Amino acid sequence: MNEHDSAKPTSERHVPVLKDRCINLLAPGFEAARLRGETPVAIDATLGMGGHSEAMLQRFPDLHLVGIDRDEEALALAGERLKPFAGRTDLVHAVYDEIADVLEDLGISEVHGILMDLGVSSLQLDERERGFAYSFDAPLDMRMDTSRGQTAADVVNNYSEEDLVRIIRKWGEEKFAGRIANRIVTARAAKPFATTGELVEQIRAVVPAGAAKSGGHPAKRTFQALRIEVNEELDVLERAVPAAVEALALGGRIVVMSYHSLEDKIVKGVFQARSKSSAPLGFPVELEEHKPELKTLTKGTEVPTAVEIAENSRAASARLRAVERIRARRAA
Ligand SMILES: C[S@@+](CC[C@H](N)C(=O)[O-])C[C@H]1O[C@@H](n2cnc3c(N)ncnc32)[C@H](O)[C@@H]1O
């Protein structure tokens, strides 16, 4: 973020991805709650700068919103933005696989809509000192929650070459993972990595110039891999999607936007498995507990329009899936 940008109000600093589509998909879940005489409750599991949350609170004047983020800086900024709705919001510093604990602490038994806008925020990418961006020299950190956990410097300085190859190849889908990992291990023997600039310099030295021309910045995929590893993004997501389904009231809806094929694979796996009958083959009747829990609301994934991508380049890789709970939750 340049100085000019950080002086702007949060609402002007970023455009929420697929905002109207997300809200339209969530709306019937809130309506189902109202029809039962309940106050609609939503979880924004990735509060970020509060763009989607603000839009939901504006559109639904009776909505209570629980906003979760593991990044305290994001929570503080979103808190400022959502001040006008303070009586209808609970903003919580947590990891989104802790949904059950967050709701228990708030005394909320179930919710009617859950939004997950995965990955890193434009705030995190733009704040130089967070170390997420390959284009600025900064401490090699990349933690979304700066209060705990290992940094990207810990990963590049301590992981074995084999483990570095694995994460750079898998999470970064980087075909030069072997060369990059080998270069990291050689360079760190002389001097441990401390900054993003030092890492970029070593990556540049081994990624052929031609590959960088067609595949974007030579460090792009390695940085993505390190960020996913540092924040354990995929392990957390594997626990979080089932946790979200468990928290959902009958008729409630979940909308997830993924930005990486491995994220989407996890979301798709849980949604598909829970949208099928679990009756054993040849079972004469389908018992209530075997009925599908979810109904899919999107055909495959939905993607943003060219206009949305022009307004917000981050939207380009967004893939949206949504489901509705069609079988009542088990009584707790
Ligand atoms: C793409 S941004 C969300 C932007 C938001 N929808 C908005 O309109 O401003 C993702 C946010 O989710 C947070 N986040 C990512 N993984 C998380 C996790 N496992 N638990 C809690 N928050 C997480 C990040 O810190 C970041 O602020």
Image: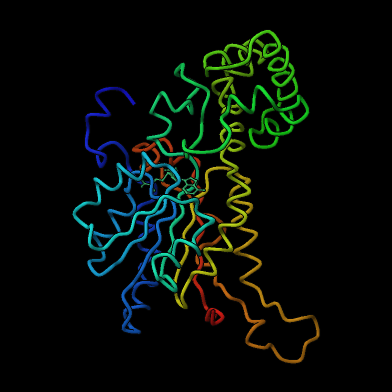
Residue 102, quarter of the rendered image: bottom left
The reply, left or right, for residue 105 in relation to residue 90 is right
**In terms of depth relative to the viewer, which is nearer, 195 or 223?**
195
The reply, left or right, for residue 22 in relation to residue 6 is right
Q: Residue at x 40, y 24 (%)?
A: 128
- In which quadrant will I find the N terminus? top left
Residue 293, quarter of the rendered image: bottom right
- In which quadrant will I find the C terminus? bottom right
Decide: is 280 above or below 57: below
Residue 13, quarter of the rendered image: top left
Measuring from the top left, give residue 242's x and y in whole percent. Answer: 59, 63
Q: Residue at x 61, y 46 (%)?
A: 234
Measuring from the top left, give residue 254's x and y in whole percent. Answer: 47, 63
| Model colouring | rainbow
Measuring from the top left, give residue 277's x and y in whole percent. Answer: 67, 77
* In the image, farthest residue toward the right: 282
* In the image, farthest residue toward the bottom: 284
* In the image, farthest residue toward the top: 190
Decide: is 7 above or below 60: above
Total numbered labels placed on residues in the image: 0
Decide: is 278 above or below 119: below
Q: Residue at x 74, y 31 (%)?
A: 163
The reply, left or right, for residue 247 in relation to residue 212 is left
Measuring from the top left, give residue 194's x and y in whole percent. Answer: 55, 17
Q: Residue at x 42, y 48 (%)?
A: 69
